[in-house]
Amino acid sequence: MVEKKIIRTFAVPNDKIMIQKARIKGTVLTAVLMCFAHASARAQDNLGVAPQTAPEGEVTTEVAAAPAKSKVEATLGLDVVSQFIWRGMKMGSAALQPTAGVSWQGLSLSAWGNVGFADWNDFKEIDLTLSYTIKGLTIGITDYWTTEAGTPYFNYKKNETNHVFEASVGYDFGFLRASWQTIFAGADGLNKSDKRAYSSYFELTAPFRLATCDWEGTVGVVPYATSYYDCDGFRCTNITLRVTKAIEVTDRFKIPLFLQLTGNPNSRDLYFVGGFTLQAF
């Protein structure tokens, strides 16, 4: 007797078939997305870009954007002042003080000048500064040059040049700025032994806002004897209170007006200075 094998077939409803197909497609799509995300992460590692993480259990295909390159920024401005006061010392009468500079990723190169217009016999000045800022710390070198001694700009000979080279370091704490400057070359002053003094200056400035104006209180001292600042030892040469208020000319143009009262306990002088700034950018 021949046995008959009965093969039973079961009809599967169409809706269940569609569900099964959708599950298969979803599984394939998930696998593709995971592969793409893995490849993106590898590409980010090769480019040095930190990958973005997704919440646990989720798959993401977003690639972290590379950081934008820092742009070169420029400054261009002009101060008009009633007197030229520097570190508590009077350097000249009413003057024009232009400034221009470029900066890139904390590195800055700037030029500053002074020319008197009330008294044309006032000496002219050109200062060049190279500095680097990282977070609150700034280090720099400044080349000061004036026409006071009558020597030409490109005369760098020892005992003849009128250039003064100064190194500086400063830190901005936000509520307080501190800086130290020391002359290391050029036409420095002398100490009590008639030797190069390496003249130095230390300053603290506290900014604050009051009555819709920006204020700054400054105290500056010369730590030891030098003829450059006309000090025979530790002396306070600068106590200044400065207030600035931006005067609105149009919706897009303002002129900062500033007033400052400066006292020099070492020379027993007091100066009241006013001025304004024209800033192009």
Image (spheres, helix red, strand yellow):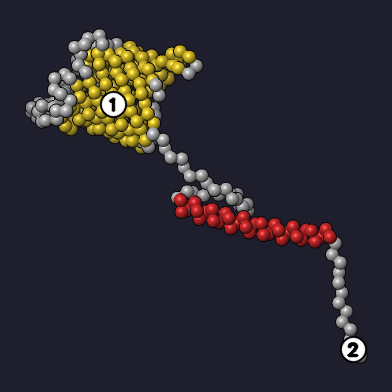
The answer to which image quadrant residue 128 occupies is: top left
Where disc 2 sits, the SS reads: loop
View extreme (right): residue: 1
Where disc 1 sits, the SS reads: strand
Q: Residue at x 87, y 74 (%)?
A: 8
Let me know if residue 270 appears in the view: no
Q: Is residue 30 left or right of residue 108?
A: right
The foreground one among 132 and 176 is 132
- What is the x, y in percent for residue 3? 89, 86
The answer to which image quadrant residue 268 occupies is: top left
Q: Which residue has dot 2 on it? A: 2
Judge whether 237 appears above or below 71 on screen: above
Say what amino acid the circle numbered 2 marks. Val
Give the class, few, some or many, for how many residues have Cα within 10 Å of label 1's Cα (few <14, many ≥20): some
View extreme (left): residue: 193
The answer to which image quadrant residue 125 occupies is: top left
Q: Which residue has dot 1 on it? A: 111
In three-dimensional space, the C-alpha distance between marks 1 and 2, rounded to whole angstroms, equals: 110 Å
Q: Is residue 45 left or right of residue 226?
A: right
The foreground one among 57 and 126 is 126
The foreground one among 246 and 123 is 123
Q: Residue at x 19, y 12 (%)?
A: 121
Judge whether 154 appears above or below 114 on screen: below
